[in-house]
Image (cartoon, rainbow, N blue to C red):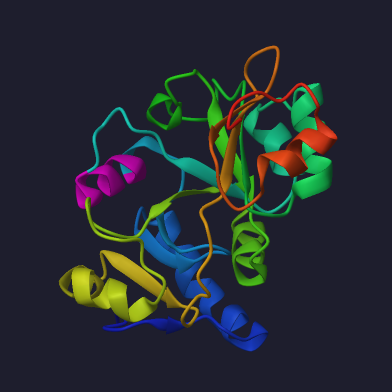
Amino acid sequence: MHESRGVPFWSAEEVEASLSGTLAHLRGGGILAYPTETVYGFGTMIDREAVDRLVTLKRRPPAKPFLLLISDTQMLGRLGLGLTQSASMLAAKFWPGPLTLVLPGGERRIPERLRGPEGGIAVRWTPHRGLQRLIGALGDPITSTSANLPGQPAAVAASEILNQWGSEISRGAIRLLDGGRLAPSPASTVVDCMGRAPRVIRPGAIPTSALREVVPSLVGDR
């Protein structure tokens, strides 16, 4: 039976109760709507068919990549992703947290559709406890993109997703994890670690000045 509204995903007990159904949904190629430390996101497992389904649902330009959410740095090794020296320093300081790093590697495990224009894979270790538990139980990352239609603001409450995607939720195409209303927060800061010097390609929750204290060679965002 599909949940016609949302699956409670607030307390530790609710997170545990949601796991078996959510893991089955993801492994069956379904799309998940979930809370993060910033806004609600849509995600799937990283196989090509599930990602294509999400691209169609969001009406997203095919060339626009998604980022990956992980629950620990060991997941990077299993994906074949490499932490450059600068990326390692930034990750040690700011992960888990609202910092997205664009990393090299992953050619054997990660579909090319998830690769950005700079050739890397965008990854974030989420600090959201419920999401960490889910991704850890899955044993693989999930994709992440904001849970909204193009041109609409990012969702900060499950009710906003229900308003836009009610029919998809009712028929089970989307499983909605209801983590309550999220506090207003900037998007994650995105740093491209593919080149010789890391470069800020999207300012966000972590100021560039704080990043530069860790990696003085950082360029971009002034």
Q: On the rendered structure, is 119 left or right of 90? A: left
User: Percent x, y for residue 15?
Assistant: 59, 79
- The residue lying at 20 percent from left, 68 percent from top is 168
Magenta stretch holds residue 11:
no
Viewer-proximal residue, 78 or 221?
Answer: 221
Judge from the rendering whether residue 156 lies leftward or rightward of residue 16; answer left or right: left
Q: Name the one closer to the observer, 210 or 150.
A: 210
Residue at x 25% of width, y 64% of height: 173
Instruction: From the top left corner, tell me how far across and down residue 187 is, in percent.
Output: 51, 53
The image shows residue 129 at horizontal and vertical percentages of: 67, 69
- Residue lying farthest left? 167
Would you say residue 140 is visible in this rendering? no
Which quadrant would residue 130 be assigned to in this image? bottom right
User: Residue 123's quadrant in the figure?
Assistant: top right
Position of the C terminus by quadrant: top right
Most common SS among magenta residues = helix
Image coordinates of residue 64 in percent, x first then y, are 33, 33
Q: Which residues are magenta?
A: 50-59
Q: What residue do we see at 45% from left, 67% from top?
A: 34
Which residue occupies the extreme top position in the image?
A: 196
Image-based side of 125 in relation to 178, left or right: right
Residue 42: which quarter of the image? bottom left
Q: Quadrant of the N terminus?
A: bottom left
Compared with 172, 144 (above or below) is above
